[in-house]
Image: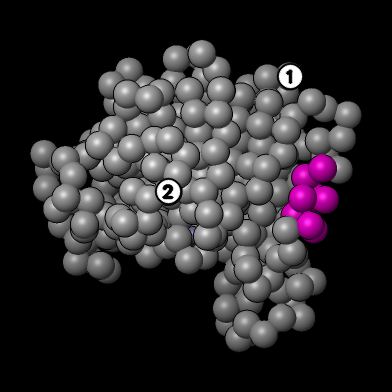
Amino acid sequence: MEYAALASGSKGNCHAFSDGQRTLLVDAGITLKQIRLRLEAVGMDLASVGAVAISHEHSDHIRAVPILLRHTDCVFMITRETLAAVNAIHGIDIPPERLIPLRAGHAADWNGVRVLPFTTPHDAADPVAYRIEWGGFQAAVVTDLGHPTALVADHCSGLDLLALEANHDVQMLREGSYPPALKARILSRVGHLSNESMGELLAGVLGPRLRTVILAHLSEQNNDPALARLAAAEVLRDTPTVLHLARQEEPLLVAGQGQ
Ligand SMILES: [Zn+2]
Ligand SMILES: [Zn+2]
């Protein structure tokens, strides 16, 4: 089992899980060309992509959906409310035969892979994060949330791998150049997760199985990778958990997970 953060950040998000035969994407917020190139760069290939699980309708998570519809035969796993928003806001029509409809809190099956969407606090129609159970391997991709919730923490227990948002440093955001309304949105309880809140959430979900943490959706303007890393490293001190940072412009491969 391999995991790759193909791209992560406000300009586009795409995560991949693959056993070499089958690949599942979580979000498709970069171009199809970049998805293909970055899959190849980590030794995966586009032809093996059978499903894309969509977290919410913001452009940085769905950009490639129309072209994936035209140029691949993958299915889309998406909640009904997010599907409606993707259609209403972006004019994207996903036909029923290309859909696996989801409901937050209810696991769905894709080829024996258990895909469990769970609700996140974010300013979208029906935002979810995903817990992926593939063989005995347990992972979650948790980005775009304004604050840590008990429900999110519950779904992140007993994981082998966690990709977790570390969006901003609160002081950098406050003192930065973003317009006040945008700062307020990001800082709100349905905005994005600060380094500090990430550390709080991470501390609550540490477990003996957790081998890998990937910090994701870092803001290029309002965060410093060193600060995000420090916030997580403090929590992971004295644990064997390995810490990585997902990047906007280049893919990160975490190989050899689980069976
Ligand atoms: Zn979002
Ligand atoms: Zn986002």
Q: Measure how far apart labels 2 and 1 are at the Cα level.
A: 31 Å
Q: Quadrant of residue 30?
A: bottom left
Q: Nearer the viewer, residue 105 or 20?
A: 20
Camera-side residue of 85 and 214: 214
The residue indicated by pointer 1 is: 208
Q: Position of residue 85 (x, y in %)?
A: 28, 60
The answer to whether 5 appears left or right of 235 in the picture is left
Answer few, some or many: residues within 10 Å of disc 1's Cα (few below 14, many 20 plus, some between 14 and 19): few
Q: Is residue 72 left or right of residue 176?
A: left
Inspect the image, locate mark 1, and give the three-letter code of the amino acid beneath it: Pro
Q: Which residue is mark 2?
A: 38
The magenta span reads 226-233
Q: In the figure, is residue 26 to the left or right of 179?
A: left
Residue drawn at (56%, 23%) of the image: 256
Residue drawn at point x = 58 percent, y = 72 percent:
185
Q: Is residue 105 visible?
A: no
Asked if the beta carbon under badge 2 is closer than 8 A to the nearest atom of ligand 2, the reply is no
Mark 2: which amino acid?
Arg
